[in-house]
Image: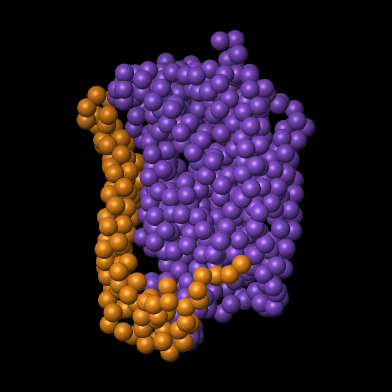
Chain colours: A orange, B purple
Amino acid sequence: MSTTDLPKAPSAQDFLDMQASPEFQDLRNRLRRFVFPMTAFFLIWYATYVLLGAFAHDFMAIQVFGNVNVGLLIGLGQFLTTFVITGLYVRFANRELDPRAAAIRAEMEGNAR
Amino acid sequence: MSVLAAGATVGNPLANIGIFALFVVITLFVVIRASRNNQTADQFFTGGRSFSGPQNGIAIAGDYLSAASFLGIAGAIAVYGYDGFLYSIGFLVAWLVALLLVAELLRNTGRFTMADVLSFRLKQRPVRMAAATSTLTVSLFYLLAQMAGAGGLVALLLDVKSKGGQSIVIAVVGVLMIVYVLVGGMKGTTWVQIIKAVLLISGAAIMTVMVLANFGFNFSEILGSAQSAISDATTKGVADRNVLAPGAQYGGSTESKINLLSLGLALVLGTAGLPHVLMRFYTVPTAKEARRSVVWAIALIGAFYLFTLVLGYGAAALVGPDRILAAAGGQNSAAPLLAFELGGVILLGIISAVAFATILAVVAGLTITASASFAHDIYASVWKRGDVTEEQQVKVSRITAVVLGIFAIGLGILANGQNVAFLVALAFAIAAAANLPTIVYSLYWKRFNTRGALWSMYGGLISTLVLIVFSPAVSGAKTAMIPSVDFAFFPLANPGIVSIPLAFILGIIGTVTSSDRGDAALNAEMEVRSLTGVGAEKAVAH
């Protein structure tokens, strides 16, 4: 039982240097600029929905077409936004985060892998 | 239709047991095959980190979609309508917290348990102890809810009415769970969850198509029929419900509305703090696979809750609220009754077996998480101060799994018939209060320190537990666990709306009142490692 080729282990100083480097700060800021606003958005959107569900029964009961009402549409909207945010994040992470993280990994561990 | 007489079981119990036994035989075979090299700690606790993102995503769905979500949510929609649907949405949206904030960074930083991440740059022993305490508490409550639920399911599906007979079935479930975990470790458990998830989701999908076909694929017509079936109900208090709009379950007093908000908060923030969910992220080789896992989980769980929406309203329309509420399991019987209505004995047998398989898979996942945390965090790090071999950790974990399993059987038998449905919501509330704030702070807030972590974790854990003990879920209400006495002073059955913000605030106050700035080198290592995967645990070579 062996693990895959062990890369050279970076030292504590290597981590401090990398943390301060512009390339790492760039990666960190890109991640935060995406996930923090997105998290705030879906939490507020979900909170709005639960508040409406708790306190605005009449509004939620307004019929839109057939027996489908506002509440059902907003509820299904929660599913839709969840799927869309998932898709947006995956595209963002694949394009913006993965190449930068891989470059830093290669730099710190050598190109052993 | 005589088999559907009020209070009687439906279908053929022998068929239900037979199909379930088939599931057990197949999964045991897979578990034994998967366990051939289960000696190292990496193999036992993470399945060698060799599962692919999609495989792990299916297993996560299997872990997450407990019998409570399947029978409970479909049943709640069938008799309360919209409020049951509202409940399911929190369970889904919660996965965005895991996807955006937690999964990948956790995978890069940790090794076996949640505590690995939380204690990475803080004082090891106190933080591990706190994280393990919370892990064991959450897992135990979740486990207890599942085991107690098994008793009710037995009455409904296998026609075992006596308490003694139900106890035997609970014991069988517990023993099977111990065998899965002991023999299969994380790899075997994961395969059980994958098989169960495929069965559960495809069973629900087939039933959904059958319901839709019954109404000419017109969803609006299902809604209309459900509402008219409810309005025609003769059961007291059902007929005047508007099941297409919110309010039938949580509509009454302001307290019950705030209770709903509190529940929603705990659901959306709890998932990404559930230890058995977090541990699943260690079974994949890289952070990118962890991301793919969550994407698969979101797709499957989302689809499943859409199915339950159709199944719930379908059960109201096709079976009717009177028959559902008169059946042995009450509203939990909506999905099984609908299966019988749609596909007779065979479909009912399949759905019943899936419901049992669900309990089995979920308890196995909880047990391996709790035993890993005990062995790795409490035994190896706190007690032996890291001076143990991996073989010893695995051995201690196996012993813990047996002890936990016996404990769960005993508690499950004691809790059988008690109203312990609040335990699942409680587990989410503790996960959201005791775990999530510290997870988020330690991943994203450089200044965060040991005192902040301890205050937040213990503060969240203790406040949630104290509030629930003095809430209407435990005493002072007809639906309480102990209805005969009343020592409740906290008005909400769901304490999350108080304890979750409290835990977040305690984390900040504890941090800023301490001069401890941590170790700059460790902080740097954790931040770089969590974002890039430098030095992260690798998959075990085959």
Q: Is residue B152 above or below residue B31?
A: above
**Residue toward you, B395 or B462:** B395
Left or right: B166, with B350 as reference point: right
Image quadrant where residue A90 sits: bottom left
Q: If the image is split into quadrants, where does the C terminus of chain B sit? A: bottom right
Q: Residue furthest top?
A: B2
Residue under the point 41% across and 27% down: B208
Residue under the point 64% across and 48% down: B33
Left or right: B525, with B10 as reference point: left
Image quadrant where residue B176 sits: top right
Residue under the point 67% across and 69% down: B390
User: Residue A78: x, y in percent?
Assistant: 31, 45
User: Residue B93: x, y in percent?
Assistant: 37, 49
Q: Is residue B203 above or below residue B93?
A: above
- Camera sees residue B254: no
User: Residue B249: x, y in percent?
Assistant: 44, 35
Q: Residue furthest right?
A: B164
**Residue toward you, B327 or A95:** A95
Q: If the image is split into quadrants, where does the N terminus of chain B sit? A: top right
User: Residue B250: x, y in percent?
Assistant: 43, 38
- Camera sees residue B172: yes
Q: Residue furthest bottom?
A: A13
